Amino acid sequence: MSVTLSPVEPSIEPSIAGVGDYIALMKPRVMSLVVFTALVGLLVAPGHVHPVIGFAALLCIAVGAGAAGALNMWYDADIDARMDRTAGRPIPAGRLLPGEALGFGLTLAGFSVVTLGLLVNVVAAALLALTIAFYVVVYTIWLKRRTPQNIVIGGAAGALPPMIGWAAATGSIAIEPALLFLIIFFWTPPHFWALSLYRAEDYARAGVPMLPVVAGVAETRRQILLYTLLLAPLGAAPWLLGYAGALYGVVALAAGAAMIALALRVRTERHGHAAAKQMFAFSILYLFLLFAILLVDRLAGGLFGHFTA
Amino acid sequence: MTTKSETMDEFTKQPMRERKPEAGIRLTEKQQRARRARSIAIAVSLGVLVILFYIVTLVKGPGVLVRPL
């Protein structure tokens, strides 16, 4: 049985897209951070989650994140083609048609949200739907090409996964996952602006109004420092507010101090972007460290009745 | 009534017979391999989904039908 492809463009060649191209559409590296932060949200939540339900929740969150990635690549194919960092993605490289990515993304989005709702709970499913919609519609379609605040507001999408994890475990939301949301939310701007400092030419060529392109390098460095000064105490907040133990407090303070030190170095950097690159790399470690220690702290703390509900 | 169904047949079947010898799009070796890989991936995904729903049903028991909003 032969299948007729795309009735819109009958001259188009049948697809040679492999499974790997579809996996690339799901942005596996972003997905891994999403799954990790969602896992922490799930495990630090009070009460017991059956491992199978927890696994189902994480799988749905991972697929939902993949859907958001695919829809982002569908919409941004023109931008991606003009940037070195993204020119090799499946659509600009010509291995996939935009319509294929759109269909793939919508299918995954629908399945992930519905499955999360059926297998886990409706609150988590609603949050996952909100996350995908926010990333695709608010960030990708509305903000990315219009304002240098794109990643600031759009960062909310990346900050939601711990809340989805928490909601998957409890069926509700609370202050603690909101804190985790705020940590990622204020982490996103210094993280991406550090990257954009040494990718400014790329963004300028693609016409994306990233902060260094629109406001200049000096202003970007100042903003990175300002956000890092907000981030460091926020990172320690779970300890300050009594949600996490001393181990978390020590690590959060030390890592926060390191982030501020790096931001100061970025601020005073005059030649090249060595400090910005360091800041970008360390920011990933920072977030990973905070969440990992929070997890360790909570799992160990549970033994001493640190948090029982 | 019979004439109507006959003309319907005329319209639907005639072009189909004419098209058959053309054989449509011929996939190259590479395209066929890619399609096969994609088909297998879809089958595996569906299998995982079925198993997931099955296991969760076992885990939740009768509670699987209880969905408070």
Image: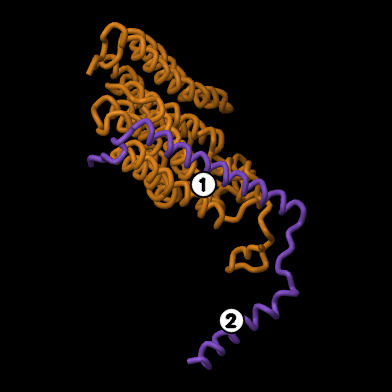
According to the image, label 1 marks what residue?
A70
Residue drawn at (51%, 27%) of the image: A280
Q: Which chain is painted in orange?
A: A
Q: Height in image: A91 above or below A218?
A: below
Q: Is residue A193 left or right of residue B67?
A: right
The x and y percentages for residue A192 are 47, 33
Q: Residue furthest right?
A: B29
Please identify the quarter of the rendering in which residue A186 is found. Answer: top left
Q: Chain of mark 2?
A: B
> Which residue: 58% across, 68% down?
A8
Q: What secondary structure is found at the residue carrying circle 2?
A: helix
Q: Amino acid at mark 2?
A: Thr
Quarter occupied by the N terminus of chain A: bottom right
Q: Which residue is mark 2?
A: B12
Which residue sits at x=69%, y=49%? B34
Measured Cα–Cα span from mark 2 to mark 1? 39 Å
The kind of residue on which mark 1 rests is Ala
Quadrant assignment for the C terminus of chain A? top left
Chain B colour is purple
Inspect this view and state whether residue A115 appears. yes
**Residue A162 against residue A7 in the figure, above or below:** above
Q: Position of residue B6 (x, y in %)?
A: 56, 89
